[in-house]
Image (cartoon, rainbow, N blue to C red):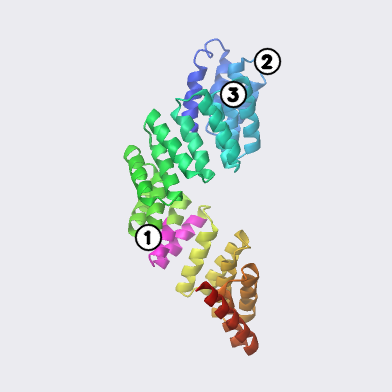
Amino acid sequence: MRTSILLVAVAFALTGTTAASAPNNADLQMRCLRDRTPDAAIAACNTLLQMPDLDERIRSVALNGRANNYYAKRDFEHAIQDFSEAIMLMPNAMLYDNRANVYRSMGKYDLAIEDGNKAIEIDPNSSYAFEGRANSYVRAGRFDLAEADYEQALKLGPERASLYANRGGSYFLSKKFDLAIQDFDRALALAPKDFGALINRGEVYRAMRQNDRAIRDFDQAISLAPNFGSAYGNRGLAYASSGQCNRAISDLGKAFGLGAVSYVALMTRATCYMQVKQVDNALRDYDRAIMIDPTNSGAYNDRGSAYGTSGKLDQAIDDFSTAIRLDPNSREAFQNRAIAKQLKGDVEGAKSDLARARELGSTAN
């Protein structure tokens, strides 16, 4: 949500009402809209909304302010309720755009797009409304429509970093990497300290296997936001891709410590631990990855290999069997289970698994 932009707009909307309001009313309005602590802002909004004979415009603005703070707390249901009530009082493009932001965060992309349509219908000259709908199209995977809306937003202006960064994200997801780089370059020319754009451009470079460039962007992002876990996580993935496992392990550890934990990052660090022969650490990461996604056959297959390396053949066979149950066409899992069975002395079982692996191999060819 473009909260800073929205708060500026709301502050201007209040001009002309504060002079006629009692001082405590004006103070409550300011705290409702400007307090940096969501709970404190919500409390101020609550008090303001309970005042008798409150002007409808001020009530709508207060509901918008409270909804923004509910959104900041990820209390999406209450945010939707407040934005909806505010829209009933004073429908405008900004409120529909705000509610669309919440719907996007809830994964309700069709509703977000509907609100984007309403925002544009009310104000067809709003660059922000087109950008908001474009963001919803991106989340829905409708990249062509998103790119058309970003283009219209750029035509309407003003030119701003968020537009280029968001369109760059759309290009990245649709695998138009060169166009994505161009847009992130434009975004960073307008906002050189936008660490989010640096991280995203780094991710594009990583997808293009240009790990050195990716790492440089992540370095710069970390210098700007040293407590942002995703920057360390993405740099760790880039280090791993370039074969620098010790650095990858270090960065991924920092990312996890800052709360940026993901299945991919855990699996990557586990693989690096295996490469540097720290099997016990690898097993712990595989355990955590499986807790995040217990339906991914690859995690069981890889953990099974780690168990096999440490001589725990029964656990290895159990994991390979689970991998096969989740993915009956996993040639690698059949091969690995065959090796484990062979080491356990189950010659016939090993032969059967190898035969199945060969069948799957010939099918793949």
- The amino acid beneath tag 2 is Pro
Q: In the image, 326: left or right of 244?
A: right
Q: Which circle's residue, 1 or 3, is located before the other in the chain?
A: 3
Q: Which mark is residue 209?
A: 1
Q: Which circle's residue, 1 or 2, is located before the other in the chain?
A: 2
Q: Which residues make up the magenta segment? A: 235-256
x and y percent of residue 34 in the render?
52, 27
User: Secondary structure beneath disc 1?
Assistant: loop
x and y percent of residue 142 in the render?
51, 44
Q: CA distance from mark 1 to mark 2?
A: 62 Å
Q: In the image, 172: left or right of 345?
A: left
Q: Which residue is mark 2?
A: 52
Can residue 38 be seen here? The reply is: no
x and y percent of residue 246 in the render?
41, 67
Q: Is residue 269 above or below residue 186?
A: below
What residue is shown at x 68% (from left), y 15% (from top)?
52
Category of crowding for the residue at label 3, using alpha-carbon neighbours closer than 10 angstroms: few (below 14), some (14–19), many (at least 20): many
